[in-house]
Every structure is written in structure tokens, then in C-alpha cells.
Amino acid sequence: MFFRKNKREIGIDYDNLPVHIGVIMDGNGRWAKKRGLPRSAGHQAGADTLKKIVTECNKMGIKYITVYAFSTENWKRPKDEVDFLMNLLYNYLKDAEKTLAGENVVIRAIGSREELSEKIRQQIRKTEEFTKNNTGIVMNIALNYGSREEITNAVKIIAEKAVKGECRPEDITPEMISEKLYTGGQPDPDLIIRTSHELRLSNFMMWQASYSELYFTKTLWPDFSMRDLHAAVMEYQRRNRRFGGV
Ligand code: FPP
């Protein structure tokens, strides 16, 4: 009880938490540049921040977090940076088996796996298997993820069903499409946070974000703290969500 009372003291309404938070973790490069460091140092610091934020979301009682780790467009970056990010992701997944899994986190990767190396695909399968029976927060790591690819993939699955005569075009519903996205079965994000003051979605959860509250902050991702997370949740709680109604 003390814990709960203590939590309330920071001004968060624990009966009105976002169930699902999406995070566009932006600004790693600028964080590093400001310090005269290579971009890789920014990504490393960003990965450390991510662990802290997921741990705190789990403690707060948030049920799902989806983080944008590598987009379908990020392959355009210099090879050195792509290689560094892939290696960081591999180590993160491997390490998460011990650290985040120990905190009861369920880890899943969302996105197209075909373009990823077999080494990463294998580690994804291992980490997912290792954490699948945990009961805490579900963490979706969006990896080689892009909304347009995700929606295209869902449409292909449904079209194949139609060709086989398993459904008719007129039977296709938004719910069916939602179900075939990588996040199928999960609630849509209530709140999407983007750091570093870029004001766009950049191909992140565009279908699922239809009614998400968007929160933008100037803070660069590696500097994003528990206090910033609490501020985003409190701002979310001040919003009046109408879902198209009055
Ligand atoms: C955007 O910052 C960030 C990324 C493209 C990568 C996000 C990755 C991490 C936070 C760390 C790794 C994550 C995991 C799950 C291990 P940017 O590089 O575009 O920054 P900039 O806009 O300042 O250049």
C-alpha cells in the first residue's frame, strides 16, 4: 500500500494509465554530437536508457510498450552504423534474456525478419521463447519495422485467404486487418512518445495510432528519464480522449 501511496505522490493517476505506450526513440546521434562522440555512443546510451524506461513502465503497471529500434528505412544509413545497430540489438536481446526477463518482461520483435541475419533471427526466437511465459509488461521491439510494410503484409495474408475462398472481399473488416498486423491481439497504443522534437510518425504504427495521443518532447532519447516518462503520462491523463465522439 505504501508503494501505491508513494507512487500517487508523483501525481500520476494509477487508475488511468495508458495500457500501451509507443516510443520513437530519436536523437541518439545529436546527443553524441553534442558531446563530441561518435553516433554509436549515442545508440549505446539510448539502449541503456531503454532498459531503465522499460523497467519503470513495468513497475508502474503499464501493460505494453512498443519501441522503434530500427525502421525499414534505416538500412539507408552508412554500413558502419547499420552494423553497429544490428550488433547492439543482438546484444540487447541476448542480455535481455537475463536482465529484463528477470524483471518478468515479455520480449517480442515486430517487423519483417527476412532481411535480418540468421544470427539475429535465431536470437529473437530464443529471447521470445525464453520470455513468453512472463507475466509483466510486453515489450515489442520494432526491428526492420515500417507501418507500410506491416499493412502490406497484412493485406497479402488476407488476399491469400480470399484467393483460397476462405473469405470474400466484402467480409474484410478493419478488425481483420488489425489482427493480421504484427501487433495482432494487442490493444492499440494509447500514447505515442517521440523524443528530440521531430514532429512526425515516420512510418511507426500508423494504423494503430489512429486514436493515440501524441506526445513530443525536446529531450534527446539518451537523456529521457523516469521524470520525463512520468511527465508524458501525466500529460496523457490531462487529455480528453473522444475517439471521434463528443
Ligand atoms: C534515432 O536516433 C534512433 C535510432 C534509429 C535507433 C534507435 C536505437 C536505440 C535507442 C538503441 C538500440 C535499441 C535497442 C532495442 C537495443 P538518430 O540516430 O536518428 O538520432 P539523430 O536524429 O539525432 O541523428
Image (cartoon, rainbow, N blue to C red):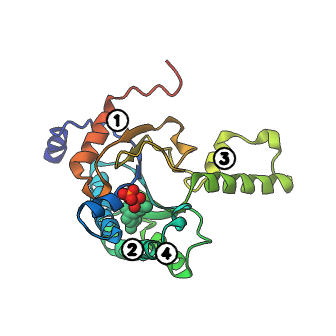
Disc 4 beta carbon < 8 A from ligand 1?
A: no
Quarter assignment of residue 11:
top left
Q: Disc 3 and disc 4: Cα gap in Å?
A: 34 Å
- Looking at the rendered image, the disc whose residue lies closer to the viewer, 4 or 2, is 4
* Residue at numbered disc 3: 177
Quarter assignment of residue 100:
bottom left
* Residue at numbered disc 1: 236
Instruction: Name, please, the residue furthest toward the top.
Output: 246
- Determine the residue positioned at 52% across, 79% down: 122
Q: Nearer the viewer, residue 211 or 100?
A: 211
Q: Disc 3 and disc 2: Cα gap in Å?
A: 32 Å
133 over 87 or under it: above or below? above
Q: Helix, strand, or loop for circle 1?
A: helix
Disc 4 marks a residue whose amino acid type is Lys
* Residue at numbered disc 2: 88
Q: Helix, strand, or loop for circle 4?
A: helix
Disc 1 marks a residue whose amino acid type is Tyr
Q: Helix, strand, or loop for circle 3?
A: helix
Task: Confirm or deny contact between disc 1 and disc 3 (CB under 8 A).
Answer: no
- Looking at the rendered image, the disc whose residue lies closer to the viewer, 3 or 2, is 2
Is residue 136 visible to the viewer in this orientation of the structure? no
Counting other residues with Cα less than 10 Å from the Cα at mark 1, is it few (<14), some (14-19), or many (20 or more)?
A: many
- Determine the residue positioned at 32% across, 69% down: 44
Q: Nearer the viewer, residue 182 or 144?
A: 144
